Image: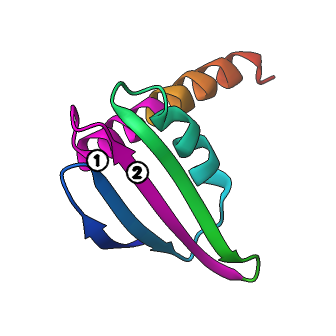
Amino acid sequence: MDINVISETEKSMTFVIKNEDSTFFNLLKKRLYSIKGVVVSSFTAQHPLVPEIKFIIETDGSIKPRNALKKGAEIVKKEYKAFLSEFEKVKA
């Protein structure tokens, strides 16, 4: 995953991810909204044939965007592990 931070302040961060589609980022976007202080979590895909995502995080200042991103990624990681654990139980 190739990540390039375009801009970062105390309350906002914009970065571009190359060679990825929107699958993971839909989930991350939703989970970021569960973090106190996150006011905007959004992304755009330039074109379906161009694998590049531009992601924007804005906070109210009570949490830095980079820290919110780390927390959001941890939430996704925990959900993945829980799903995998449940899936292993039903695997015949």
Classify residue 7 as left or right of residue 2. Answer: left
Mark 2 crowd level (few <14, some 14–19, many ≥20, 10 Å Cα): many
Q: Residue at x 48, y 61 (%)?
A: 55
The residue that disc 1 covers is: 65
The colour scheme used here is rainbow
Q: Residue at x 39, y 68 (%)?
A: 15
Residue 77 x, y percent position in the rendering: 45, 35
Q: Nearer the viewer, residue 40 or 90?
A: 40
Q: Which residue is mark 2?
A: 57
User: Quick one: quadrant of the N terminus?
Assistant: bottom left
Q: Does the segment drawn in magenta span residue 74?
A: yes
Magenta region, residue range = 50-75
How far across and how far down the image is residue 81, in percent? 51, 28
Of residues 4 and 60, the one drawn nearer to the viewer in this rendering: 60
Residue at the (18%, 51%) spot, across then down: 10
In this rendering, the count of numbered labels is: 2
Quadrant of residue 9 within the rendered picture:
bottom left
Mark 2 touches mark 1? (CB < 8 Å): yes
Q: Of the numbered discs in the image, which one, if any, rests on residue 51?
A: none
Q: Residue 19's x, y, as percent?
A: 56, 77
The quarter of the picture where the C terminus appears is top right
Q: Secondary structure at mark 1?
A: helix
Across and down, in percent, residue 40 comes to 46, 44
- Is the residue 24 above or below the residue 31 in the image? below
The three-letter amino acid code for the residue at tag 2 is: Ile
**In the picture shown, does residue 77 fall above or below 52?**
above
| Residue at disc 2, secondary structure | strand
> Label 1 sits on what residue type?
Pro
**CA–CA distance between discs 2 and 1?**
6 Å
